[in-house]
Amino acid sequence: MKIVAAKKILKANDQLAEENRHRFHAAGVFVINVLGSPGGGKTTLIEALHGRLPIKRGLAVIEGDLAGTIDADRLAARGIAAVQIATEGICHLDANMVSAASRELELEKYDWLFIENVGNLVCPAGFDLGEDLRLVLLSVPEGDDKVIKYPTVFQSSQAVIITKADLLPHFEFQVERVRQDLRKLNPNAPVFCTSAKTGEGIEEIATWLANAATGR
Ligand SMILES: Nc1nc2c(ncn2[C@@H]2O[C@H](COP(=O)(O)OP(=O)(O)OP(=O)(O)O)[C@@H](O)[C@H]2O)c(=O)[nH]1
Ligand SMILES: [Mg+2]
């Protein structure tokens, strides 16, 4: 019975995600779902990309957290339009939450909409939000074995972003191991090695995203 119930919920989510996708496309906004562990560098990466992406109209962010408005406040302080979703204990965003939050934005005013998912390498992977693509972050302190241990999120993302590369000298983290593990699981996904601290790799992601948005 439980399995049937879960399938029903996911089907309803997928239908709503399609509606979101349709509305996002109609508004001409390119939508990126950002996944990764708590503290992996999601908000910092979005801030860094805000400075590098080609922006004709604007960039907005939907922030997902269990509670509080820290990330949305942080972005707003930089002049970035942000809507905070407080999931009140739920470990992922779903299409219904994103539908409601996106209605707080005038979508036509933006080229880019980032959705920062709840920090978690497991739960968000199963929920389509209506995004154009998914990025999954893996920060150097988390360890280089995560592709094998959390395959769903790495399999369902279009690119993997290693963050905090400035910390590589302090950790036994092999970037090549991540590339090798990913090659078996999701061979078409590029791996970007980045540091928001030094700026390494940020331009490369911005260029890749700009190409993806152009080719949509
Ligand atoms: N050394 C280093 N620290 C970083 C880098 N990027 C982010 N950080 C730090 O990592 C911590 C977490 O960064 P956030 O961007 O808030 O991480 P997050 O994934 O948004 O966190 P949650 O929203 O809480 O899940 C902060 O102290 C950042 O300054 C980086 O490239 N290098
Ligand atoms: Mg954050």
Image (tube, rainbow, N blue to C red):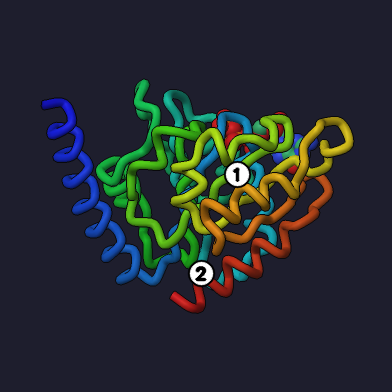
Structural crowding at the residue carrying mark 2, measured as other residues with C-alpha within 10 Å and reported as few (<14), some (14–19) or many (≥20): few
Q: Name the residue under label 2.
A: 57
Residue at 37 percent across and 61 percent down: it is 107
Residue 97 visible somewhere in the drawing: yes
Contact between marks 1 and 2 (CB within 8 A): the answer is: no
In the image, taking residue 149 as reference, residue 132 lies left or right, namely left
Q: Position of residue 175 (x, y in %)?
A: 75, 46
Classify the position of the C terminus by image quarter. bottom left
Which numbered disc flags the more N-terminal residue, 1 or 2?
Answer: 2
Q: Nearer the viewer, residue 193 or 102?
A: 193
Q: Name the residue under label 1.
A: 137
Residue at 73 percent across and 52 percent down: it is 193
In the image, taking residue 35 as reference, residue 174 lies left or right, namely right
Residue positioned most to the right: 169
Q: Where is residue 209 in the image (x, y as percent from the top left)?
A: 57, 66
Q: Nearer the viewer, residue 128 or 146?
A: 146
Q: Position of residue 55 (x, y in %)?
A: 58, 68
Which amino acid is tagged 1? Leu
Foreground label between 1 and 2: 1
Q: Is the residue 12 above or below the residue 167 in the image?
A: below
- For the residue labelled by badge 1, is the local secondary structure a helix, a strand or a loop? strand
Q: Is mark 1 within 8 Å of ligand 1?
A: yes
